[in-house]
Every structure is written in structure tokens, then in C-alpha cells.
Image (cartoon, coloured by chain):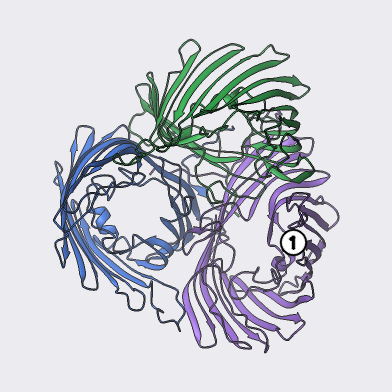
Chain colours: A blue, B purple, C green
Amino acid sequence: MHQKTWIALAVLATAGAASAQSSVTLFGVLDVGVAHVTGEGVSRTGLSTGGANISRLGFRGTEDLGGGLAAGFWLEAGLDVDSGSGKTSGALAFNRRATVSLSGPFGELRLGRDDAATFLNTLIFDPFLTNGVGGTNAFIMLGAPIQVSNAVGYFLPRELGGFYGQVQYAFGEQPSNADNSKQGNYAGARVGYRTGPFNASLATGKLKGATGAEDVKAHNAGVSYDFGVVRPMLLWASEKKGAVKITAIELGATAPLGNGELRAQVSRYSTQPGSADWHKLALGYGYHFSKRTQVYGAVARLKNDSGAQRSIGLQGLAATGTTLGGSSSGYEIGIRHNF
Amino acid sequence: MHQKTWIALAVLATAGAASAQSSVTLFGVLDVGVAHVTGEGVSRTGLSTGGANISRLGFRGTEDLGGGLAAGFWLEAGLDVDSGSGKTSGALAFNRRATVSLSGPFGELRLGRDDAATFLNTLIFDPFLTNGVGGTNAFIMLGAPIQVSNAVGYFLPRELGGFYGQVQYAFGEQPSNADNSKQGNYAGARVGYRTGPFNASLATGKLKGATGAEDVKAHNAGVSYDFGVVRPMLLWASEKKGAVKITAIELGATAPLGNGELRAQVSRYSTQPGSADWHKLALGYGYHFSKRTQVYGAVARLKNDSGAQRSIGLQGLAATGTTLGGSSSGYEIGIRHNF
Amino acid sequence: MHQKTWIALAVLATAGAASAQSSVTLFGVLDVGVAHVTGEGVSRTGLSTGGANISRLGFRGTEDLGGGLAAGFWLEAGLDVDSGSGKTSGALAFNRRATVSLSGPFGELRLGRDDAATFLNTLIFDPFLTNGVGGTNAFIMLGAPIQVSNAVGYFLPRELGGFYGQVQYAFGEQPSNADNSKQGNYAGARVGYRTGPFNASLATGKLKGATGAEDVKAHNAGVSYDFGVVRPMLLWASEKKGAVKITAIELGATAPLGNGELRAQVSRYSTQPGSADWHKLALGYGYHFSKRTQVYGAVARLKNDSGAQRSIGLQGLAATGTTLGGSSSGYEIGIRHNF
């Protein structure tokens, strides 16, 4: 097989404007590990994927249109390294992101499938980035989406003295004369402020249910501060569907340690009505072989209140289940390679 | 994530012949827009994809074999930017084209999955290239294929004083002793003449039905002439399945206007027997931000005769349906980015 | 569409170590041909794929971590060029390989989906590399895997005076409290010795069945010697599932002839208990247009004993079936293009 290597250069586009520069980038994350998860009286051992970062393969690019304008695209497919599978019928699709953007001094207009505005804080303010045994449970608690298709998004420009924000609307695409004509419509917004070591963000969104089914409302907020020796972070997230509500509060931290990073979180998930609460503790470490390659390990323990029955599972390694009010734990050691 | 950019250079192949040059090209089209389609008393709004050009991702390459011979390959997957989905079980496959070719002074021999010979005229002689609200309805009217698998194709060489042509045979791959042993066999041919501003082409093909089921016969022809200020085109297409026949006649035109292109078509689709005819009117414009990026808009209206019930739909946004004899309309605004 | 070509250069990684070099390679094999297969009183003609080498598309890369260590990844998807389909729900997934590796003086540790240790000899010691009408039937005879997911593999370092070897364990990932808690667990090992023209290898493995279902045990060995004018090879392979056992013995050879390679094999497959044996004869030739492009042809004949009913099929062209004790034959001519 003939070797070809993609090298890091910007190319002069074939586009008219002499100043136009463009690039196409292949990128990916391959993350795979050995993991063990337990419930009460049961365990499962195997290979997991995405323990530190979600495994993915993507193509993205930008084109300078002149006058401060740029066009961009992003295609990103999730995959399971443990099995080689993709995430749509077991095969590859750009389920994580498929967008075309126009950006300029006004900000960015983005069309396609993208992260939901209400998902991002649960990722960014979790030391485990939602991944692996240690990842937060503060998302899709009652059905709020991770990604949304058919979305129109607007992002504020980057130079606003630290302020950032986005609004997003996704079409459910139901026919106008149907009883459930609004089913699947999603609207979300996120605003934040980041300066030096400080970052804070709020998000809110609503996913319309079918006729007779409740909407899912999601709200969350996060704040982090990098003291250098440690970066503590606090995440609050709530999802509400009709009379049911789950609220998560997570205190996390990352800290440089040796040639790597220590990660820890403690979180509590409160369900109303009822006593289906649970909490989770996790500790992990990622050792940087290089900027691209990390070896990581993590341990976590989840404890249910009397009415809850949650157990720890991973991408590529299903949860075992546990008893009502029981506990669950997990550990993993893996390798994450970016390209 | 590590940035890599593919640059535009031909590489000396590792193949023996010192003269051998080869290239591998990543290419794609991402086209996404906001669209609205209506039937009688019903509408649907959402994101569409492929309004100006079908969204796709592909890999292709050629290898100079010396002596005027070349080997080539082409892999092309359709995709929906609005949802990130592919076209096979929702995931990516090279449904648009997967071929290996040998070409030389004799022409090109091509094996694999490819556009059907009888599809191409309906694409080339439609100002909307079959896409979006304005695209022609002159293909797959009664089941003639867009692409065919298991195809052997032969293309005339390019230097024939303007003449071009192809023949194509695709195997249905039924067992010889089955009642339906010819089911799925497809044979097609296309010939044309192109010189300066003039282009004209004829195609004919047949898809074998199952035992007791009729074959689908497709015939079509197109002609266009580029006067500079306007390029009118005429497309005639017919599909016949047993006693049923649909005939399309479309008059279209493109015209440069400002830094873009105006597009228009009027077409009529006649069904025999019966009164299930319909016609369609469409007007659109594409503004060229650059050679690679176009912003476009289009409006279209379809009117059914008393026995027809057609309605306008798009890639990524399903048609609404309409009443018998009713009308349907649509508009869209989108962005198409090539790489 | 904007042309971009990936050129053959090593790039300085963005990683910390100044010595770190890394590469990402796109690679593929596209192999498609016209084939004809027969059983008693029945035949099928069409396009096949992978007659000389399995068609595939992949991405792989390595990163120098310093100190003799390297990280590597490999993603490889099988595909059918005749239809453009992938191998998972008809779409693309990295079903052939998806791994991340750490390698160094100690050898290589590899995690993910990979070739089963017990598959490799049946590939390497078959002149047809398991492919096309002539390929060996000495694998998946009773269900031993070609690839395994959730696998941990260790490979000996390359510099051991010709010795090579690997051990592999793949997790079935059943819950510990299930009756079938070991179902799908696979363990395999392979050792060999290669020096100059000589190569020999042994492999053994076991796939755990469900509760009450038998395990599949596979053993095989191969030896080849390249005399220059001819490279004979011998393959012995056995699979056992409970009381049933199939044993294959194949004598094969490749020989340079003109600007190509002659391939031949004769093989016998013995089933115990019973009389469901069969044997196969095959002859083929591959002409090298270049290092990357080969045109090939092959013919094969399979003869069943009274209790067997095997028939020749190919990737992309299903077998026809035959009568009990009947014969089957096939021929094909195709083109294989690597990039």
C-alpha cells in the first residue's frame, strides 16, 4: 500500500480572490481501554471506547471568502474502537456533527446537525468530559438531546471581551396539519464569560414532545477557575419533563500532576418526586505520552438511594444493572490517541 | 487535534515506471438550507440538504500506467448534511459511485456501481441538476434507476470531434434456473455531441422486471445552447412500464446575472393512460461567494391534473402530500460548499 | 471540485519531543471483476469484489513517542466495489480493523478489533489469500472468527532472529452472573519462524460457545519456501465444534511468470463424522500493470463427496448452491487497484 501523508500547510484555494486561503483537515480521536463495571452481585469486563475522549473520525475545512468572511464545514462521525462500529445501524454516519457555516465579523451562522446548546456545559464543566466510568450523569437525564439535527445556530463573534454565546433552533419537521406538528422542535441558548483563568456559562433549552407528551426542559450552568495547581469546577444541571425533574450538582477538579492531569468529581442527582436520587464519586489520572497520546485510568463509585437503580456503563461496555438502592462501581485503563 | 492539510501536488508514484504519476483526491459537497414545502392545507418547514448539489464525500484517484493507459478509482458516498446521515441504513456507503477504471486511447472500461446511462440527461439538461424544490421530476418516474450496481460500462474516448457516448450493462445476479433469472438486469446506452456552446444527447435503457412484472423502459434526450447571456435547454424523458407511460418535457434556462446564475424551468409530465398529469414551474438564483461556495434560493410550484397527487419534497425534508388535483409549492434558501 | 493530493512526506508532529515524527496514511484496495459461478444445473453471472485482495478503505498512522516507543492506530473498513456497500448494515464500519497500539522494544500491545490469531495462517499460506473463486475454504469452517472485537493482543518484537508470535484475548463481555457468562470469549496464539525464503507458522485458538453450546476450537499451521522459480506452500487447518470436526489440507504455489504471478492450489476438506468431505482445485494468474494495479483471472472447481453440498461463491456474487455430492465451479477476471 502506497504511503501518503497529509502535511500541515495552508493552500491557496482555486477560488477567485488571490487572498483566499483554505484548508481541509482530517482529524480523529481513537480511545480504547480495558474496563470493569459492577452492580450488586454482578460485573462485566471488556473493552471500552472513549474513556477519556469520544472516539471519532472527521473532516473539516475553512475557506477564506475575503472581506472578513469565511465558509466552513465540519463532518464528524463517532465510532467504537473496541468493535470498529459506527453509531448509526452499527455503521459510520456523521452523527456528531455535519454543518456548513458562514462566519465573519457578525459571528457565525451554522446549519446542520450539531451539539445541542444545552449539552455543552455538562461536557465542559465535567473533569471527565462526560466520558468513561468517571463521567458526569448530568446530561440526557430525561431526554434532552446531545446533538440535534435540522438545526440553525448563531454564535456571537469571538472578540467580545470574553463574552460568548449562541442561540439554536432545530426543526422537528412535522407536517403543519398534524396533531403533533411541533414534536421534535428544539430551541436552546447558551451564554458565558471567559477571561484568563475564569470561565462561566449558562444554558437553557426546550425539546417539544408529541401531542399529549410533555416537553423536556433543560437548564444548566457551570463555572471553573484555574488556580494553576488546581482547576475546580462546579456544574449544576436540571432536566424537567412534566412533573418529573432531575437536578444534578457536581463538584469537580483537574490538577496537573507530573506529566499528566489528575481528575476528580463528586456529584449528586436528585429526582422529584420520589426518592430515586443517586450520587457518584470518581477519581482519574491521564498521563501525557505526548500532546497526541494519553494513557489514562479512572475509578468510580455510584450509590443509589432506595428508589434508584442506576449503574455505571461505558461506551462499548454495557452497564450491568444493579439492585434498587444498590451501588455500582467501575474502573478502566486506556489509551487515547489524537490525530 | 493535530492539523493536517492536503495540498495540491501530483506525486511520483511508487510504481515502477519512472513516468508514472498518480494522485488521490478527497472531495466533497456540503449543501444545506432552510426550506418550506406545502400541499393543499398543509406545509412543512425545516432543513434540507442538496438543494443546489447533492451532498457527498468521496475519494478518487488515477494512476498513470504508461503507454497512454491509466487506472482510476472513484468512491462517492451521498450524505444528508441536515442530519449527518448517510444513505444506506442511515449510514455511509458509496451508494453514488464505486468504480475501478482502465482508460486509454480506446476509451474507458469501468466496473462497479455507477450512474445509470439513462439518468444522466435528466441531470445535465435540468437547470437545477435534479436538486431542490426546482429540480426536474423527469427521472425515476416509473422506477428507472439513478445508479446501478454490478455494472460494466464502456465510454468512448474524449477526442472524437465532440462525439461522446457510453454503453452500460448491469447484472441482476439472479440464479440461471430461477423463474426471475433476468430480474434486475439493466442495459443502457447514451450518445451525444458537444461542440462550443452546443450540447445534445440521447439515452435509452431497460431494467428487467421480475417474472410476471413488466420491464421499465426509459428514453430521454436533451439539448442546450449557450448564447452567453442565456443558456436555454430542452429535456424530453419518457419511462414506460407495461401499459403505463409517463412522458416529461422540460424547458429550462440558466443565465449569468451579477456574480451568480439565474435558473428557471417549466415542465409538464403526462401520464398514459388516465389524467394523472402534472406540471411544474421553478425559478432560482445562485450567488457565487467563491468558486467553492454558493448561496442559493429557489421557489417552485407544482400543479396536478384531476388524477394526480404529486407534491414537492426535498432531500432531508419530506414532501407534505396534497389533494388529488391539488397543487404544491416550495421555497428554500441554502448554502453549498465544495471541497 | 477542488483537487487535493496527499503527498508522501513525514511531518514533524506538534508533539513536544523535537524528534517526534508522525504520519497519517489513507490507504485502500479496490478490487472488482466479472465472475461466473456454477452448481449442478445452475449458474450465476455478475460482478464480484475482492477477487485478488479484499476491497477496503482505511486510515492509519504512527507517532514516535521517543525512547523507542511509538503509538499507532489503524482503521480499516471492508467494502464491496460492485455495489458500493460496506459490510455493516450495508454501510461502512471499521469491521476489518480498529486498533490503537503501543509499541517499543518489548513488542506491541494492541487494543480493539483485529484479525483473529487463528485466521492469519489460512490467509498467508493460501496462494489466493482466501479470495475469489480460488481462495481456500480453510477458515470459518465451523465458526472460528476472522476478526474479533474487544481484543487485547500482544505481538513479539520484530527483531528476534526470525521468530514472530502473538497472543490474543477477546472479551465476550457477558455479565458475570449470566449462565452464558463466558460466551464469546476468544483466546488465540500464533508463533512462527521466517528467515530468507522460509516461513512457517502455527496457531491455535478457542471461541467459547453459549451455555449448552459447544466451543469452537481452531488449529492451523502453514509452511512456505520460495525457490525463486516457484514458492510452494502447505496449509493444514482444523476446526472442531463438539463432536464435529473439519480438517483442511491445502497444497499451493505461486510462481513468477512474465510480468505477473501464477497461482495454484489443490485442497481437501474432511468432515468427521460422516462423508461430507469436499475438495477444490484452482488456477489463477495476476498480471502487474504496476505495483498498484493488477489484472487477474482465476478458475476453480469444487467437488463434493456424497454427503456434502458446498458451492463456490464470491464477495459480491452469491454461491448458486449445488446438489448433494455435486460439483461447483467458477471463473473470474478482475482488476485490483491499491492506493
Q: Is residue A271 above or below residue B24?
A: below
Q: Amino acid at mark 1?
A: Ala
Q: Position of residue B239 (x, y in %)?
A: 76, 71
Q: Quadrant of residue B225?
A: bottom right
Instruction: Name the residue furthest right.
Output: B161
Q: Position of residue A84 (x, y in %)?
A: 45, 42
Report the residue at 45% width, 12% height from top.
Answer: C160
Query: Neighbour class for label 1 at 10 Å: few (<14), some, many (≥20)?
Result: some
Q: Quadrant of residue C225?
A: top right
Q: Secondary structure at mark 1?
A: loop
Front in this rendered view, residue B285 or B279: B279
Front in this rendered view, residue C110 or C308: C308
Q: Chain of mark 1?
A: B
Q: Is residue C115 in view from this perspective?
A: yes
Q: Is residue C116 above or below residue A109?
A: above
- Specify whether B52 is left or right of A202: right
Report the residue at 71% width, 37% height from top.
Answer: C324
- Specify whether C19 is left or right of C326: left
Q: Position of residue A255 (x, y in %)?
A: 17, 41
Report the quarter where the C terminus of chain C lies: top right
Q: Quadrant of residue C71?
A: top left
User: On the image, numbered disc 1 is attached to which residue?
Assistant: B210
Q: Position of residue A313 (x, y in %)?
A: 29, 47
Q: Is residue A205 above or below residue B107?
A: below
Front in this rendered view, residue C93 or A244: A244
Number of disc labels = 1
- Specify whether C298 is left or right of A89: right
Report the quarter where the N terminus of chain C lies: bottom right
Instruction: Name the residue furthest front.
Output: C274
Q: Is residue A233 in view from this perspective?
A: no
